[in-house]
Image: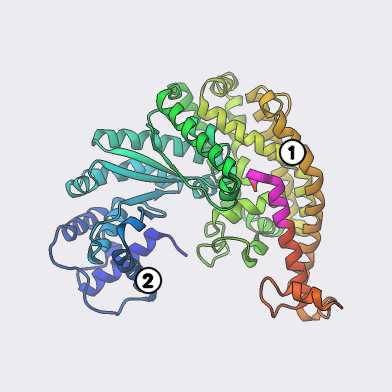
């Protein structure tokens, strides 16, 4: 479950080690590129006829053999997750060549983390500078941008601007080399993972980055929400088309340099605060695991992928989906707003409130970013999060919870000040959304209370096991027993099955109530 770029790196390392030409992993980027280009243009095969590779490398090589056997029309592009360098792209092209793929798939680097997004223009410049690669792509290239992992890496505000800046700079580099660039936006369904109203998201992209074409991921529950019904499906496609046409024919105004400079400051401050809290505060990981159902999400079969990329306990290995989902369940939404209040407060202290208000009024990117966070804040309730903390968190960690709720309130107040609103979602265009939120909230609160009760029961059971007072629990009805065996391990004790199913049901109910923040 580690990234595509890492798997390709391991494969190349085993190949070069077996051939006796050195350890690919230890080579610098210049040596990797020289080796890969040489092999791509060579007429002899590179792969030795042996089967001494490790299991993971065998799987990588067999994937490329399968690609070679399938009709080209059945395949799209090859996306490399966690791409960081030009050699990541060239190595995939070489592995395709060695597998006898006749018509090489276009390789799409996926830039996900903050550092990778910042370096993406340099990476693509290096690729375009390779004469063989430039000839191979035929004037067309696609780059994928990761919204989920960049947000988990640096916080929503820093990630949003890094994505904005990367698009501008990648477009400039591609234009310089005569390459038509298409952006593939890897957006999730939630605001914390880059989601939100589709039309606004497209219209707020930088000028010159759409040009009549773009790709966007549609995943999970968003597929059903946007495409399950015929009329809604066509309405969704109408939104895609109209927003793309609007942006291409009437692009948003160019951001003033003063605004971009201030955005750089806001990004740096919010990123520092986010990372200081999430990755450097020794209390955070313990608080997160106890105050949210993160551990239970990983154990239950409610996701499309494993909750972690690697079997470690850190936030780094946790996938973005359970990271956002866990905080959404407690109605605290921390990944969306953490760091933003600190950044805005620092700017206000420097006398830049008027500039922030001007940016909100006249820069679509900044306005959409603020509006999406405001929409999420309207759905959150720190009192519910405090209830989770009261029942599930150790006493010595509760001080951190208080600090986080203070930051939430600071963010809310400053957001309203910048937007010029008295309360959250007070503009006429938000009145229907506000009404829906008010209607759903009374139904979600009982689910939150039930979830806390059953999380406590689940954790007590895990601690006490067969010695607990509920170990002998057995429903009197055979019908109930059969129902408890329908999902999960059929050998689960009835009590454990009942509690796990109850937690799962509350998760689904809360996610439905939270809509695009769940």
Magenta stretch, residue numbers = 507-517
Going 30% across and 55% down the picture, which residue do you hit?
A: 105
Vertically, is 7 above or below 331? below
Q: Quadrant of residue 119?
A: top left
Identify the element where label 1 is drawn. Answer: helix
| Residue 512 point in image, percent of width and height | 69, 49
Which circle marks residue 188 in the picture?
none
Label 2 element class: helix
Disc 1 target residue: 437
* Main SS of residues in magenta: helix
- Label count reads 2
The answer to whether one can see residue 332 in this image is no
Q: Give neighbour class at mark 1: few <14, some 14-19, many 20+ (Cα, 10 Å).
A: some
* Viewer-closest of 338 and 450: 450
Which sits earlier in the primary sequence, circle 1 or circle 2? 2
Seen in the image, is 131 located left or right of residue 74?
A: left
Residue nearest the viewer, comparing 199 with 151: 199
Asked whether residue 137 is in view, the answer is yes
Residue ranking furthest to the front: 230
Label 2 crowd (10 A; few <14 / some 14-19 / many >=20): some
Q: Quadrant of residue 143?
A: top left
Question: Looking at the image, which residue is at 66% across and 50% down?
Answer: 327
Mark 1 and mark 2: Cα distance apart in space: 47 Å
Q: Is residue 175 left or right of residue 398?
A: left
Q: Magenta span has 353?
A: no
**Residue matched to label 2:** 59
Q: Are marks 1 and 2 in contact (CB under 8 Å)?
A: no
Q: Nearer the viewer, residue 359 or 477?
A: 477
Q: Does the magenta-highlighted stretch encompass residue 510?
A: yes
């Amino acid at each position: 479950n580690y990234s595509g770029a890492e798997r390709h790196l391991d494969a190349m390392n085993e190949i070069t080690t077996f051939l006796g030409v050195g350890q690919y992993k230890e080579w610098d980027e210049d040596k990797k590129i020289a080796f890969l280009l040489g092999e791509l243009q060579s007429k002899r095969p590179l792969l030795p006829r042996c089967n001494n590779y490790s299991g993971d490398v065998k799987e990588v090589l067999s994937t490329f053999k399968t690609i070679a056997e399938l009709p080209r029309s059945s395949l799209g592009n090859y996306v490399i997750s966690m791409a960081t360098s030009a050699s990541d792209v060239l190595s995939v092209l070489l592995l395709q060549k060695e597998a006898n793929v006749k018509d090489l798939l276009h390789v799409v680097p996926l830039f996900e983390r903050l550092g990778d997004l910042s370096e993406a223009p340099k990476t693509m410049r290096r690729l375009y500078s390779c004469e063989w690669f430039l000839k191979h792509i035929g004037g067309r290239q696609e780059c994928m941008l990761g919204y989920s992992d960049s947000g988990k890496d640096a916080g929503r505000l820093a990630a949003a601007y890094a994505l904005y800046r990367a698009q501008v700079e990648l477009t400039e580099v591609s234009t310089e080399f005569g390459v038509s660039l298409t952006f593939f936006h890897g957006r999730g369904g939630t605001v914390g993972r880059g989601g939100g109203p589709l039309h606004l998201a497209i219209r707020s992209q930088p000028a010159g980055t759409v040009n009549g074409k773009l790709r966007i991921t549609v995943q999970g529950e968003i597929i059903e929400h946007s495409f399950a019904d015929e009329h809604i499906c066509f309405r969704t496609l109408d939104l895609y088309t109209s927003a793309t046409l609007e942006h291409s024919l009437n692009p948003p105004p160019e951001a003033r340099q003063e605004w971009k400079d201030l955005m750089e400051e806001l990004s740096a401050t919010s990123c520092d605060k986010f990372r200081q809290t999430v990755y450097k505060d020794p209390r955070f990981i313990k608080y997160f695991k106890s105050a949210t159902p993160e551990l239970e999400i990983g154990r239950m079969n409610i996701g499309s992928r494993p909750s972690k990329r690697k079997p470690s306990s850190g936030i780094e290995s946790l996938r973005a989906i359970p990271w956002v989902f866990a905080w959404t369940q407690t109605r605290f939404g921390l990944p969306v707003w953490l760091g933003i209040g600190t950044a805005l407060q620092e700017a206000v202290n420097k006398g830049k409130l008027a500039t922030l208000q001007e940016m909100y009024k006249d820069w679509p990117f900044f306005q959409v970013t603020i509006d999406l966070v405001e929409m999420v804040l309207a759905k959150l309730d720190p009192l519910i999060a405090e209830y989770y903390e009261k029942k599930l968190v150790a006493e010595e960690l509760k001080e951190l919870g208080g600090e986080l709720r203070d930051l939430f309130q600071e963010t809310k107040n400053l957001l309203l000040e910048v937007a010029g609103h008295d309360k959250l979602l007070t503009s006429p265009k938000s009145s229907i959304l506000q009404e829906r939120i008010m209607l759903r909230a009374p139904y979600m609160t009982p689910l939150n209370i039930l979830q806390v009760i059953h999380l406590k029961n689940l954790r007590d059971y895990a601690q006490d096991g067969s010695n607990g007072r509920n170990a002998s629990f057995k429903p009197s009805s055979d019908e109930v027993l059969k129902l408890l065996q329908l999902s999960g391990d059929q050998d689960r004790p009835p009590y454990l099955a009942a509690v796990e199913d109850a937690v799962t049901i509350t998760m689904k109910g809360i996610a439905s109530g939270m809509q695009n923040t769940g």
